[in-house]
Amino acid sequence: MSDNELKELMAQLLASQAKTDAQIAKTDAQLAQTDAQLAKTDAQLAKTDAQLAKTDAQLAKTDAQLAKTNAQLGKTDKTLKEALRQLGGIGQSQGEVAEEYFYNALEEKKEINAIHFDAIAQNFYNKVGDIEGEYDIVLINGKSVAIVETKYKLKDEDVVHLLNKQIPNFKILFPMYKEHQLYAGIAGFKIPKATQEKAIKNGLFVLKRKGEVMESVSQTLRVY
C-alpha cells in the first residue's frame, strides 16, 4: 500500500470515527432527555399515588359515614314502625272499647227509638258468593232488624259505607230476615256534627255516649 493510499484510508477512518462519535453524542443526549422524561413521569406517578391514597382515605371516611347514617335510618325506621304499631293498637282498642260500650248498653235495654228488640248479637258475619260482611251489632225481633255501625270516632265515609254497602248487602247475606223491616244506625264516642246530620238526613239512628249512659239523637227512622 502506498503512502497516498494509507493516508486516504486513515482519513476515511477518522471521518467514520467522527461520525460515530457524533451519533453517540446524539444518542447520549436523547438518553438524557428520556431519563429526564422518566424522572418527570415518576414524579407524576408518585403525585398520582398520593392523590389516590388521599381519595381512598376520603372514600373510606364516606363509607363509614354512610354506614353510620344507614344504622341511624334503620333505628329510626324501627322506631317509626313500633310507633305505628302502637298507634294501630290504640286505634283498634279504642274501637273495641266503643263497640263493647254500645253492645252492653243495648243488651241491657234492647230498644232504639221506642222499637223493642228481643235479641242482640255482636260481630254478625256471613259470606254468600263474592259478597261478605260483618256487622258490629245486630238487634232482632219478630218483624224488625237493626244494624249498628260502631266506631270510636265516626267519619262521613263510615256513613257512606253503611248506606252503600252494609245496608244493601244485609238481606243478601242473611236471607232469613228478608221479610223483616231493616233499620240502621251509627254509634260512637265522637261524632262530628256534619257526620251526625248526614246520618239523620238519610234516616239512620245515631247513638252517642253521654256520661255513663247512651243517648239517641235520632229523628224519623227509614226502613230499608
Image (tube, rainbow, N blue to C red):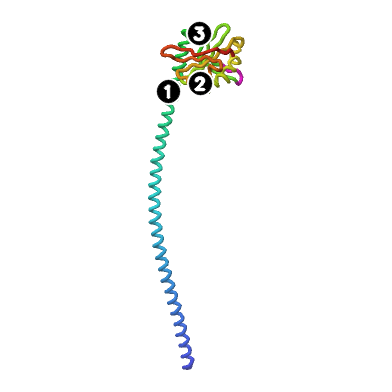
Q: Residue at x 43, y 69 (%)?
A: 34
- Residue closer to the observer: 1 or 118: 118
Q: Characterize the local packing of mark 1: few (<14), some (14-19) or many (20 or more) Cα atoms within 10 angstroms.
A: few
In the image, the segment drawn in magenta is 126-130
Residue type marked 2: Thr
- Say which amino acid is labelled 3: Glu
Alpha-carbon distance for marks 2 and 3? 23 Å
Could you give the CA–CA distance between mark 2 and mark 1, rounded to whole angstroms?
A: 23 Å
Marks 3 and 2: in contact by CB < 8 Å? no
Quarter occupied by residue 68: top left
* Mark nearer the N terminus (2 vs 1): 1
Q: Position of residue 79 (x, y in %)?
A: 40, 31
- In the rendered image, residue 3, in percent from the top left (x then y), is placed at 46, 93
Q: Which mark is residue 195?
A: 2
The residue at 40%/40% (across/down) is 69
Mark 3: secondary structure: strand
Residue 184: horizontal and vertical position, in percent?
54, 14
Q: Amino acid at mark 1?
A: Ile
Which residue position is annotated with label 3?
111
Q: Is residue 178 left or right of residue 31?
A: right
Report the residue marked by disc 1. Answer: 90
Q: Camera-side residue: 171 or 82?
A: 171
Question: Magenta segment: does it hold 25?
Answer: no
- Residue, x 40% and y 46% (percent of image)? 62
* SS category of the residue bearing label 1: helix
